[in-house]
Image: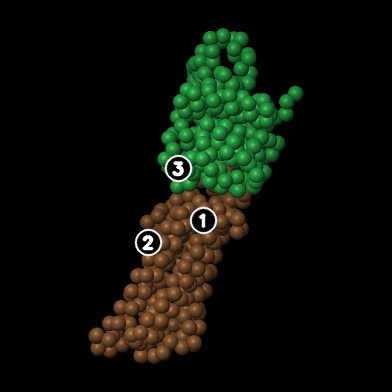
Chain colours: A brown, B green
Amino acid sequence: MLKWMRLEFKKHKINTYVHASVIIAIVLFILVFLFAYIPTIDNDSEMQIFRDYHNLLMVCGVLSLVSFSILSSVMYCKFIIQEYGSNRIYMLFSYPVHRGKILFSKVLSVFLFIIVAVFMCNTTVFTVFAFTESFFSLMEDAFTVELILKTIQVSIVMAVIAATIGVIAMGLGYIKKSVPTTIVSAMLLSSLFSNIASINISNAASMNMFLIIFMGVTIAAGSITTIMLIKKVDRMEAQ
Amino acid sequence: MKEVAVQTHNLIKTFSGVDVIKNYNMTVLRGSIYGLLGANGAGKTTAFKILSGLLVPIGGKAEVLGKDIVSQRDEVLKNIGTIIETPIFYEHLPAKENLEIHLSYMGIENVDIASVLEAVDLQSTNRHPVSKYSLGMRQRLGIARALSHKPQLLILDEPTNGLDPMGIRKMRELFLKLVKEENMTILISSHILSEIQYIADMIGVMVNGTIIEEVPLETIKKQYPDGLEDYFFNIMDGGQSNA
């Protein structure tokens, strides 16, 4: 499988997506900084929730999840929708490798890329932000070991959700072999997530419960999507 | 008696209720060049797609290199090289990388890619991406890719499209060399009748999805000393009036 995944990254310009991830991280850092800074100049009581590391972490997580879900859908458009929806299929279907295996290597390549990218982005942004706090403090609470563990935990969960939202969006886009459908599906699914998340943001217990349930549902839906696509591709014809 | 490389029995393929391929019977012997002739829309590309595992027939049976193309598809794909319609590549990569990817999927290692590219008059040192290639260069690269893994059978749909006269002659010599030295079998379609006339051992004429005649080129040459063109137009007129 590793061999096929390496070939996928060779076939598609992976640097483009690395650059996109870095840009997302930079924009996210600026937004996190703004979210933390605004309560210091605006005394609105609702804004004060962002002076708490836990809440800021959740906002950072949700923003990165939305961004990377969309990046994931864009990657799936390139890796799968455009490959199976164009005459590139002649090339893909001329290899003596089980078609399902090639498709699975594509799904897994993007999935793992997004997981690593979200995790790296979230932990880096939060670490750099915490580091800047030692120079000019904006937060009310301290950056503790417990918070570091929480950052890692939230980053992993958000990474998995972002990657699986991409898979589900790809499945929906594949029905019409449409790039816009894929990207819009990812936007809608991640918006649904962020809206529910925003309701629970200040309640740690309900937020944890929501994250676990949403992750479970998306993993189940993503797995079903992948299995159905593998079966479909195996029976597919290149007209 | 030569072994059979491709054998089809009453193949049928339908698109939207229309029989594009029907009662398609073909026999291609190993180590020979089979030229498939037919007007536009006769079904040549569809037939080649079935033999390459890209399409599944709704009726009949096709054996390629002794294996069933539907149930043993991956086994067949290991041993065939194809050009179907315009060759497609990874546009941002140079020719060498495109061949490397192809060979990785074919499970073949230690291929001298430079000599494969030189065989079709492409420079292995050319680092330009394929997107910068002319139509002729793309066609040459397509041919290089089709034969890079040393297949036993080449299925070439209009392989000389876009090639200049020198390129066409070069490819003709290459195809004859592959048959003679590597004992490859070549199944080729072309609109350029003279092209087929120079290289083919057997001619198959396709009309409305059916091969209406399979004749050794030698026999045609005896009956039509002026060339394949007279034979083709004669049979096409007859074929259409029969259809």
Q: Which residue is mark 1?
A: A9
Which chain's residue wears label 3? Answer: B
The amino acid type found where label 3 is placed reads: His
Residues at marks 3 and 1, common chain? no
> Which residue is pictured at 52% across the width and 18% down the height?
B194
Of marks 1 and 2, the one in the foreground: 1
Eyeballing the image, is B108 above or below B167?
Answer: below
Residue at point 51% right, 15% down?
B229
Disc 2 on helix, strand or loop? helix
Which class describes the residues within 10 Å of circle 2: few (<14), some (14-19), or many (20+)?
Answer: some
Numbered label attached to residue A184: 2
On screen, residue B124 versus residue B64, left or right, reads left
Judging by the rendered image, the residue that carries numbered circle 3 is: B128
CB under 8 Å between discs 3 and 2: no
Rounded to the nearest whole Å, what is the CA distance between mark 3 and mark 1?
20 Å
- Above or below: residue A188 compared with residue B179: below
Question: Nearer the N terminus, badge 1 or badge 2?
Answer: 1
